Structure formats: C-alpha cells, structure tokens
Image (cartoon, rainbow, N blue to C red):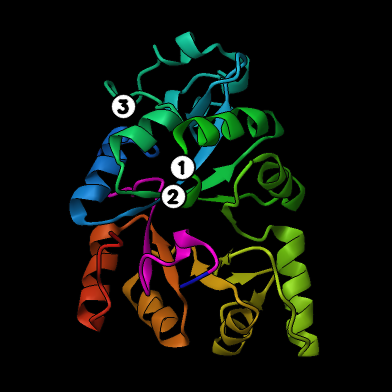
Amino acid sequence: MHKYRYLSQAKFMEFAHRGGAESDICENTLQAFKAAFDVGFRNFELDIRASSDGYVFVCHDNNLKRLLDQNLYLSRLRARDIRKLRLYGNQSIPLLSEVLEEFPEAQLNIDAKAWSVVNPLCKVISATHSYDRICITSFNDFRTNLIVRKLDQPVCFGLGVYGVSYLYLNFLLNRKQRFKAGCVQLPTQSLGIELLTPEFIRFAQECDLRVHAWTINDRDTINQLIKAGVDGIMTDRCNLLKSVLTEQGIWQQSF
C-alpha cells in the first residue's frame, strides 16, 4: 500500500489526457471524460482555472481563442458567462465539481494552472471530501505546495519543475532522497536530455516516487516506457493505450 491511496488502486495507471482526443469531442469536457470512461479509463488528467468570481472550471487555456476563436479570458469572466459558452457547437466548459460528481469512480490528476485557482480548489476538495481521489500537480512547486498546505487532510501531489530538477541532480550524484510528493510526471525528454531511462525511473522509484509519462500517443514509445518500468502513462489515444496494455497483460481498471 502506497502512502497515498490515490497511488494504491492499480499497479499500472492509465491516464486519459484531458479526456483523450480521438473524435470530435472537445478536450476537458464531460463528453471527453465520458468517452474515456467508456473505454475503461478510471484516471483522468485535467487542467483547472478559476473564473473571476472564484468558481473552478476544467480548462487548459486562459485565453479561449484556441477553442472558441475569440480572445476571451476565462479568468476575467463570471461563472454564469462561462456556462453559456459552447465548444464545438454543443459542449460546455465543466466545473471541477461536476466532473467529481459525474464520475465518482474516477481519480483526477489535477493541474492547477494559475494562482487564482488555489483557494477555490481547496474549497471544492474540502466540500466534496475528495482527498483520496485526486493528485495535485503544477509546473510551479510553490503553487502545489501551497494547495497541499491549505488542505486539512493529506493529498497526493507531484513534483514541479524545481522538484524534478532536484530529483535529477540527486540521480546524477547517486544520492537517494525521500520526498513528500507521491509521484513525478515527465515527458520522455526535456532540453535535449533523455529523462525516462530505466536507470532514472528505477532511481525515482527507490526514492518512493511513482513515475508517470506524458503525453504518449504512439505504440512504440508506449512499449518502450513499459519495458523501462514506468508506473503510468498519460495519453490522448485511449484506445491505443488500452490495446497495448492489454497485449502486455497489465490492463486493469483502477477500481
């Protein structure tokens, strides 16, 4: 049993990145998460931001131009106005509380995209008592740590940029450390450095960190990472990842 229940539900964790992207369904919507859930995914990766009046919405971009072709900033809009927006014609930007309620069997890997979402997020987590169902992540370690400190119960969280740098430095020095974080989530490479080597993965695991790879959308890389020993993979291609995990004999629903 891992120190965080979030990481104890499955030997290998499959993550639907923003719900996946294999159809005309918009990312980070209830429809996207429903599609991933129907495939059998029980771990969703999603992004959150706060409206101007402090509601937590599931959305990657602050500027909604990529999704709506309009220069609208989510952080400047009130919740009631965000609720009126339609993506791909008929899909809406959901509240985090809606995702938690709609998918009670799912776990959420939550990327807090802005400082303004810190307090509203803590309120949602406390109100829904979803401590064991979530993992808090951010590129900014200080933001993640503030969220964790503000909560009245422990929650799983991942290392940000500084934490990853510190972990990698200790790897180079062969100096094992203990981390309060539960996981490290990484791309295969950064700044020309191959990160997810078998040696680094094993070192991170010996530091009591689970290793999750993002965002992996091709069969060969999925197979290479499984062989290298990662504990989970985030993908846009849910059916492909399920197919490979089934072939490898490690597919299982988390709950």
What residue is pinned by disc 1?
Answer: 130
Tell whether position 16 is magenta.
yes
Of residues 51 and 87, which is closer to you in this image?
Answer: 51
Which residue corresponds to the image point at 38% horizontal and 66% vertical from the top-left? 13
Residue 61 visible, this angle: no
For mark 2, give the secondary structure: helix
Along the polypeptide, which appears first: circle 2 or circle 3? 3
What residue is pinned by disc 3?
Answer: 88
What residue is pinned by disc 2?
Answer: 133
Which residue corresponds to the image point at 60% horizontal and 72% vertical from the top-left? 189
Of residues 185 and 193, which is closer to you in this image?
Answer: 185
For mark 3, give the secondary structure: loop
Point out the frontmost of discs 2 and 3.
2
State left or right for residue 245 relative to residue 96. Answer: left
In the image, the segment drawn in magenta is 3-22
State left or right for residue 219 relative to residue 176. Answer: left
Q: Amino acid at mark 2?
A: Arg
State left or right for residue 45 relative to residue 202. Answer: left
Q: Quadrant of residue 101?
A: top left
Q: Quadrant of residue 40?
A: bottom left
The spot of residue 138 in percent (x, y) is: 64, 49
Q: Circles 2 and 3: CB distance less than 8 Å?
A: no
Measure the alpha-carbon separation of dots 2 and 3.
29 Å
Q: Residues within 10 Å of mark 3 (few under 14, many from 20)?
A: few
Q: Amino acid at mark 1?
A: Ser
249 w.r.t. 42: above or below: below
147 w.r.t. 135: above or below: above
